[in-house]
Amino acid sequence: MKNVLLIIIVSSLFFSCQTNPPTTIDIPVSEFGTIKIISNVSDAKIFLDGNDTGKLTPDTLKTTVGTHTIELRKNSYDITSQNVNVIKNNTVEINFNLYATDKVVLIEDFANVSCVPCVTSNKILEQLTNHTFGRKRLVAIKFPTNFPSPVDPFYLANGPDCNSRMGYYSIILAPTNVVNGKLKPIPSDSNDVKEKVIGELAKIPQFKIDVQSNINANNFIIDVSVEVKDLTNLDFSKLVLHTVVTETNIEFATPPGSNGETKFYDVMRKMLPDNQGESLASINQTGTYTFQRQLAINSAWAQSNLNAVVFIQNKETKEVYQAGSTF
């Protein structure tokens, strides 16, 4: 009996020592790529998928392959983000354009209904203002010229204000674009115009301009609020506030000139209080200042297509510091 019990115990120990074949566990091996991040404004914080990387632009990140979200943040600039597809053992470069909060850029365009190159320039401006940047970032005013055709109907409607701005900028060619009073890109080169605008949008504004309008008894009433945020290097005796009434979406059944165009945008109708603007010499401290303009509406204008564009300009250097509009 003892021998039988011993055999059972030994057998039990033998079989209990046996093991199953080892189990293979597949551990995923991460694959990596690199993102090179460049921005028009340096030292912006870089966030990867919502997490602060501790890095500042320009810099590179090593991360897993696949789609990731890169976000840039910097004080006084709007937050911006892009999705990027990271490829194994490759470097993907992405470029960001940061825009200063509340910054609005102005383009003044000098054109004529019989100017053939103006057709291309007008299409570029329409694309940039309505789509690429939007009118909260970029506003345009089109000043008609009396060349090549002296009978441009928009020029004839208000020659004095047109002449004033042409003389101010020494305009001798149509089309001519003036960005923020001092930059003159090639008007037929969309990239050149765009780059000039992006450069200006990166500048932190010293003013914020809010513009509201309403129509009362056939009068176009414009209320302007100017917030002075920073007095640094400003000589208010040289600054003027311009208010310009524009009409957009003007359509003709047949072209009014020889270049074939029948639809026109952002045409200057009147400068208020006049083409010299209003001096801001009385301002000497930060704060908010209000102005009001009023204009009798010409019966030839479509009331629903009227807007007001307001901008602050140094009358000597011609620099436009900030713009705003009712768009």
Image (cartoon, helix red, strand yellow):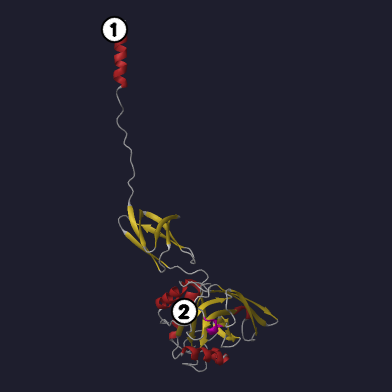
Residue drawn at the location 53% of the way across and 84% of the way down: 238
- The kind of residue tagged 1 is Asn
Q: Position of residue 79 (x, y in %)?
A: 48, 63
The kind of secondary structure element at disc 2 is: helix
Q: Residue 96: horizontal and vertical position, in percent?
A: 41, 66
User: Is residue 239 highlighted in magenta?
Assistant: yes
- 219 displayed left or right of 317: right
The amino acid on which the numbered mark 2 sits, given as a three-letter code, is Lys
Mark 1 and mark 2: Cα distance apart in space? 105 Å
The residue under the point 56% across, 79% down is 309
Front position in the image: 239 or 245: 239
Tell me the residue that label 1 is attached to. 3
* Camera-nearest residue between 59 and 171: 59
Quarter that holds the C terminus? bottom right
Q: Position of residue 245 (x, y in %)?
A: 59, 82
- Figure disc tally: 2
Local crowd at mark 2 within 10 Å, few (<14), some, or many (≥20)? some
Task: Please say if 119 is above or below 97.
Answer: below
Q: Is residue 209 visible?
A: no
Residue for badge 2: 123
Q: Which residues are magenta?
A: 235-240
Image coordinates for residue 308, horizontal then vertical, percent: 59, 79
Residue 299 against residue 104 in the figure, above or below: below
Query: First in sequence: mark 1 or mark 2?
Result: 1
Q: Contact (CB < 8 A) between labels 1 and 2?
A: no
The quadrant of the picture occupied by the N terminus is: top left
